[in-house]
Amino acid sequence: MKSRKIALYPGTFDPITNGHYDIIERARNLFDEVIVAVAESKDKNPLFTLEQRIHMAQIAVKNLNGVHVVGFNNLTVELAHEHNAGVLIRGLRAVSDFEYELQLGYLNNSLDEEIETVYLMPKLKHAFISSSIVRNLLKFNGKTEHLLPIEVQKIIGSLN
């Protein structure tokens, strides 16, 4: 029997964006299962609570078979072990992301040599989107409909 290929896509997802969704779809085409892992990330001082971010991610991916969402507050490699994930997914939007992501990939591999990191790029139309850009727009009631999944936009609108 062929073993299932499980990938873990960790991040803060504060909030989950169309860029994240694009990466999740691409990962789902490559792996049998994709786990979207929402980090507590208290040190980043997220705008949304962990529960809100998990809920937004669950709503955003509800129609994608083989994708599910978990929250976590431990090392990514430990979470990967808990879920039998052998691959970590990381998104790259620009060259500026590369150095940090490369260091993170090497760090995770130093903790577990069996863990592979796969870097995926979103479609060009989503390449500029980041959660920090969305949060800045939200602070000033700026337009974010084109940056977020529709269901996530509705949730955020209901919180205000």
Image (tube, rainbow, N blue to C red):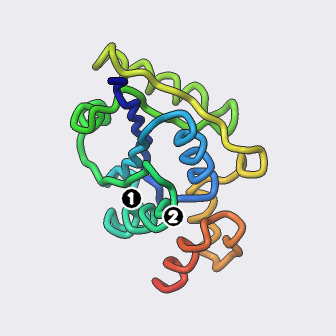
Q: CA distance from mark 1 to mark 2?
A: 22 Å
Secondary structure, mark 2, is helix
Instruction: In this rendered view, identify the residue nearer to me: 71 or 28.
Output: 28
Instruction: Tell me which residue sits at (63%, 51%) in the image.
Output: 19
Mark closest to the chain's N terminus, 1 or 2: 1
Disc 2: CA contacts within 10 A as few (<14), some (14-19) or many (>=20)? many
Instruction: Tell me which residue sits at (66%, 37%) in the image.
Output: 121
**Left or right side of 75 for 159:** right
Instruction: In this rendered view, identify the residue nearer to me: 87 or 41.
Output: 87
Q: Which residue is mark 2?
A: 60
Residue sitting at the far front: 1
Disc 1: CA contacts within 10 A as few (<14), some (14-19) or many (>=20)? few
Q: Which residue is mark 1?
A: 45
Residue 72 in the image, given as x and y percentages of width and height: 27, 49
Q: Amino acid at mark 1?
A: Asn
Residue 6 in the image, given as x and y percentages of width and height: 38, 34
Instruction: In this rendered view, identify the residue nearer to me: 121 or 100.
Output: 121
Instruction: Tell me which residue sits at (69%, 75%) in the image.
Output: 142
Residue 159 against residue 129 in the figure, above or below: below
**Left or right side of 113 for 142:** right
